[in-house]
Amino acid sequence: MIVFVVLCLIVLVLFFNLSATKRRKPKSAKPIPGPDPWPIIGSLHLLGKYETPFEAFTVLSKIYGDIFSITMGSTPCVVVNNFNLIKEVLIAKGGDFGGRPDFMRFHKLFGGDRNNSLALCDWSVLQKTRRSIARTYCSPRFTSLQYDAVNLVGTNELTVFMTELQKLPLNEPTDIKPVILAACANMFMQYMCSTSFPYDDTDFMKVVRYFDEIFWEINQGYAVDFLPWLLPMYNKHMNKLSHWAGEIREFILARIVQDHVNTLDYQSPPRDFTDALLIHLQEDPNMEWNHIIFELEDFIGGHSAIGNLVMMALASVVRYPEVAKRIQEEVDDVTRGQRYVNLFDKAAMPYTEAVLWETLRKASSPIVPHVASTDTEIEGFPIKKGTMVFLNNYELNLSAEHWDEPDKFKPERFLSPAGNVVKPAHFIPFSTGKRTCIGQRLVQCFSFILLSTLLQNYNISPGSEIHIKPGCVAVTPDCFKLILKPRNTEPN
Ligand code: HEM
């Protein structure tokens, strides 16, 4: 009997140990497959021949599988290529992957510390607070007062925007990006700071340009990001980044924040996002002046993303005249040529909305890489703290596995047979999970009214060669020209 009991105990102990080990240990102790790194550069040579590293990632995934490891310089990285793995990283284990890459360029752009930036900081309690202050203003719900405010600000700026466009030469190649960016900047500044600027204000236009330079810059990759010993060769470049950031800071303090500080009534509800930040600064002992100013700068800077998206949409619209025609039919139907478009017309203009989704799909802007903040695992493979994770949404957006004729620009793919906008679950241009884009609703609002208004008033054709970099939602600050030909259905 004693022997039997002892045997049972041994079996029980073994059983519990085994299942505990199973729970603790990753499913696979095997290393993640991937190319052998070269000394010093790691696998950077494999990316060099592609316009975007994401093209290389897709090619490598065909060799090594949906999850593979790659070394960039000496940084261990993992690339995940299918939707389930991307969800595992961003949603199921979002807390383990809350870090961001530690690139020197990012520090230079944000006053010497990338943790000042909302998009490039590691996850922290401060980040949680910053996101929650921003949510009301930057993610306005359809039925909220904030949404009405976005609509009002956007439509008011359209009048100024159209006046400025009319000053451009017509029927010949012209550079419309600065005007589109200025309109976006004013929509943001009016909405977030209750102020806007004339388009001939040289300091305003300079700052709009610097924001755009930074947006382009953030969307590029450089060898120095992974090979910091190249830094001395990039000194001039890094100083330029600090200069742009410094000039933006000066403008925002002098021309926006100072007036708010002088006139803020702490007993009244905030007039706008700037007030909300200043009030939070007074109420929250963990918040510092620098935190709120960087947050304001970050969100105002979001306007560049929208200006660039509108330029990207125009690049496709001018290539496919039938797309332009359908947008014009929608906008003419809704406005009867009597007024500008507003946000409440969106429901009746699904094709125009679909054009913007298709632009985002084709642009396939990368999700900012995440970094493991703790030892963890993906699909049972062990991942060490500090590993950088690339989420290959380029593959999700452009593979034949997910889309019919993925290379074609077909906005109707986002329309149901009944004509409503539908997006497949694997389409995540703004990412998902705890670090998902906070500005996505503003993107959908302002890009919609800008694109519709441009096509309502002009027939647009290419004015120079158009080259769009794959896997990037930014176009170069000095980009292609367009030809504007007025239509005869101008609203009053
Ligand atoms: C074409 C327009 C835009 C696209 C495609 C886009 C896409 C993205 C993506 C993919 C991320 C990364 C999410 C992740 O790492 O999981 C992100 C983060 C972010 N976006 Fe956007 N975005 C756009 C415009 C904007 C605008 C206009 C704003 C501000 C008003 C904004 C604010 C942010 C912020 C603050 C983050 C960082 C969130 C965090 O890391 O916690 N974005 N965006």
Image (cartoon, rainbow, N blue to C red):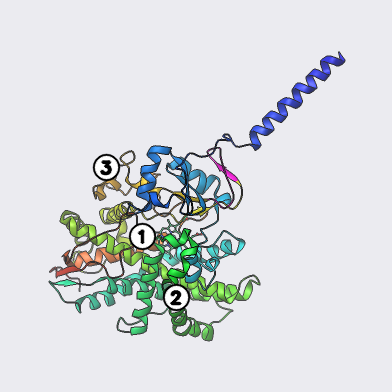
Say what secondary structure mark 3 lies in: loop
Q: Nearer the viewer, mark 3 or mark 1?
A: 1
> Eyeballing the image, is 114 above or below 391?
below
Badge 2 is on which residue?
A: 239
Left or right side of 65 for 327: left
The alpha-carbon separation of the residues under discs 1 and 2 comes to: 34 Å
| Residue drawn 57% across the image and 61% down it | 128
Badge 1 is on which residue?
A: 444
Outermost residue, front side = 39
Magenta residues? 376-387
Earlier in the chain: of badge 1 and badge 2, it is 2
Task: Give the quarter of the figure containing the N terminus.
Answer: top right
Whether residue 408 is visible here, answered yes or no, is yes
Residue 386 painted magenta = yes
Q: Residues within 10 Å of mark 2 (few under 14, many from 20)?
A: some
The residue under label 3 is which amino acid type?
A: Pro
Left or right side of 405 for 429: right
